[in-house]
Image (spheres, helix red, strand yellow):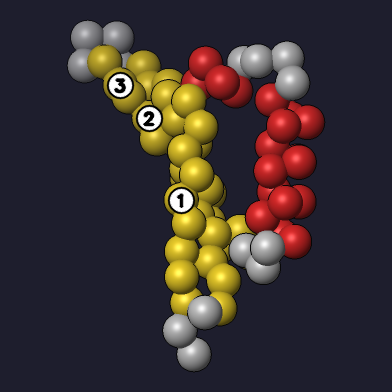
């Protein structure tokens, strides 16, 4: 069985928008209707050596579906 993959990247600024959750639910439901399955989510972080602080700057969602 062969698969194809889709990557969705969301910035920190976008996560702060007022309709972020609603927008993501609509997008995920749309992807699901197209046969895409969410298989992984990762937070991409940046850090500062001076302050020893890390913050999430982006979220990466990985989807797959059968070809």
**Which residue, as the protein is rendered here, is positioned at the far bottom?**
1
Q: CA distance from mark 2 to mark 3?
A: 7 Å
Q: Are marks 2 and 3 in contact (CB under 8 Å)?
A: yes
Mark whose residue sits in front, 2 or 1? 1
Q: Residues within 10 Å of mark 2 (few under 14, many from 20)?
A: few
Location of residue 33 with respect to 18 vertically, above or below: below
Return the disc, 2 or 1, that comes first in the chain's sequence.
1
Task: Check disc 2 and report its element: helix, strand or loop.
Answer: strand
55 horizontally vs 26: left or right: left
Location of residue 1 with respect to 9 vertically, above or below: below
Location of residue 56 by image quarter: top left
- Residue 63: percent from left, percent from top: 54, 59
Q: CA distance from mark 2 to mark 1?
A: 17 Å
Location of residue 59 with respect to 35 vertically, above or below: above
Task: Check disc 3 and report its element: helix, strand or loop.
Answer: strand
Mark whose residue sits in front, 3 or 1? 1
Q: CA distance from mark 3 to mark 1?
A: 23 Å
- Residue 67: percent from left, percent from top: 52, 79
Return the disc, 3 or 1, that comes first in the chain's sequence.
1
Q: Residue at x 74, y 21 (%)?
A: 19
Residue indicated by mark 3: 47
- Residue 32: percent from left, percent from top: 71, 60
Q: Residues within 10 Å of mark 3 (few under 14, many from 20)?
A: few
Residue indicated by mark 1: 7
Task: Check disc 1 and report its element: helix, strand or loop.
Answer: strand
54 horizontally vs 13: left or right: left
Residue indicated by mark 2: 45
Location of residue 26 with respect to 17 vertically, above or below: below
């Amino acid at each position: 069985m062969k698969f194809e993959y889709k990557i969705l990247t969301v910035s920190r600024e976008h996560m702060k928008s007022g309709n972020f959750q609603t927008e993501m639910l609509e997008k995920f439901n749309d992807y699901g209707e197209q046969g895409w399955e969410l298989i992984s989510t990762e937070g991409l972080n940046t850090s500062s050596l001076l302050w020893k602080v890390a913050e999430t700057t982006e979220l990466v969602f990985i989807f797959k579906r059968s070809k």
